[in-house]
Amino acid sequence: MPNSSLIPERQLVFSPALASTIGLEEAIFLQHLGELFKHHEPQIQNSFAWLSIERGQLERALPFWSPIDLHRISRALVDKGILLINSPPLHSAEHFVFALNESARTKEPAAVPAAPIDYAQTTSATPVPRRSAGLLPAHWSPSEDLLTLLTMNHTIPRQFALDQLEDFIFYWRERGETNHAWENKFRQHVRAQWRRQEQNQSEAFRVKQPTVLDNKWRPSLDALEILERNEVDQDFLEQAIPEFILYWRERGTNPKDLNSKFIQHIRIQWAKYTSAMEHSTEPKRITEQWYPPEDVMDILNMSHIDADFARSMIPEFIVYWRDSNQAHTSWNTKFIQHVKYNWAKRHQLDQTGQSNAGQQGSNPTGRTRDRSLQDDLSDTSWAQ
């Protein structure tokens, strides 16, 4: 071929088949490293042939790549299990220490050819070397691809990931374990540290309750939902908030967990309130929605009174006492009296057709037609 000013230098030779397998940049860089074994004496360590090359030599031989590019491509070869590196990242180190990931016993380093290898014939028989498990190198560093992945997929800043490198290397070298996927280990390590930092920041910036409660304080929605599920009346809740605020303000302290304290406070107050309502000594009129509680039904059941019969008495009982407009302290007791009397009266009529089971109340005849409903409801002979 005649000399041409368009081709002033010796050409870089690479294998198209290798480039299609591992990538164009990786193929060019790998075959250039293979050429270096012909001109430098490697050191055999752990069955691998290691070379130490000045970074400047690589920059002069491959001027179209910056130090960052050289580091990126070398890391890509490491990730593919083709290259071993035992030096700091190329863009920050003066020397590049590397070895091909193949045993020096089976193949002398000097035999690594600079000329193209016919990978089309050897690919099936001798595939690209598999990544083998090994100790983490002292100067290991993540690939640029991994740093980009952490930034794009997990929104983890590049500098944060690099800040974790020293601890990562120290931890795994102290353990002395081998691994074939240090990149994946590092990714997991960085993500765990990032989550821990986010949790710490969330705790640090969490809005804290004021030292002294003011009148604008409100329980959280979760606290209100819990109390509503416990069937605490909404009006009762609203009326209890000022009382709760006043209580803690007068004590001059602020409980650590206001919402938990509020739930506890309301539950106690609500229990007292409902108990007082059920056992109030203050007379009150019966309501249209009044219904005997389970305790009342249990008492009637123990007296062998049919539950359906007792429930059938409820409408008549409510209508009478609402029409009478009277107030009593315990409608439960009144209802028990009413049901027991009518149950006894029904059994007397069933047995004889007339009242022969003794005199009831103030009516000496015992005849129901001679008794008023008022007499029936006020009768207490059943309890004697």
Image (cartoon, rainbow, N blue to C red):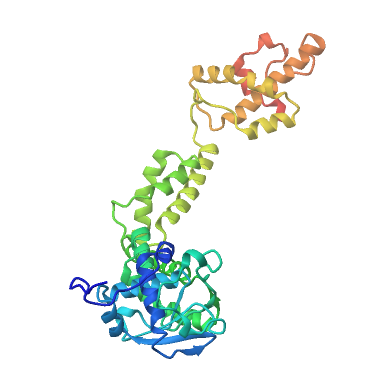
Residue located 17% across and 73% down the image: 5
275 or 281, which lies in front? 275
Residue lying furthest front in this view?
2
139 or 276, which lies in front? 139
- In the image: residue 110, left or right of residue 208: right
308 or 231, which lies in front? 231
Residue located 43% across and 63% down the image: 17
Point out residue 372 in the picture as x, y percentages from the top left corner: 62, 13
Point out residue 23 in the picture as x, y percentages from the top left corner: 39, 64
* Residue 317, quarter of the rendered image: top right
Point out residue 132 in the picture as x, y percentages from the top left corner: 54, 74
Viewport quadrant of the N terminus: bottom left
Residue located 37% across and 64% down the image: 150
Residue 12 vertical position relative to residue 328 in the rendered view, above or below: below
Residue 317 vertical position relative to residue 198 in the rendered view, above or below: above
Residue 1 vertical position relative to residue 347 in the rendered view, above or below: below
Residue lying furthest left in this view?
5
Point out residue 79 in the picture as x, y percentages from the top left corner: 44, 70
* Residue 334, quarter of the rendered image: top right
Q: Is residue 171 visible?
A: yes
Q: Is residue 361 visible?
A: no
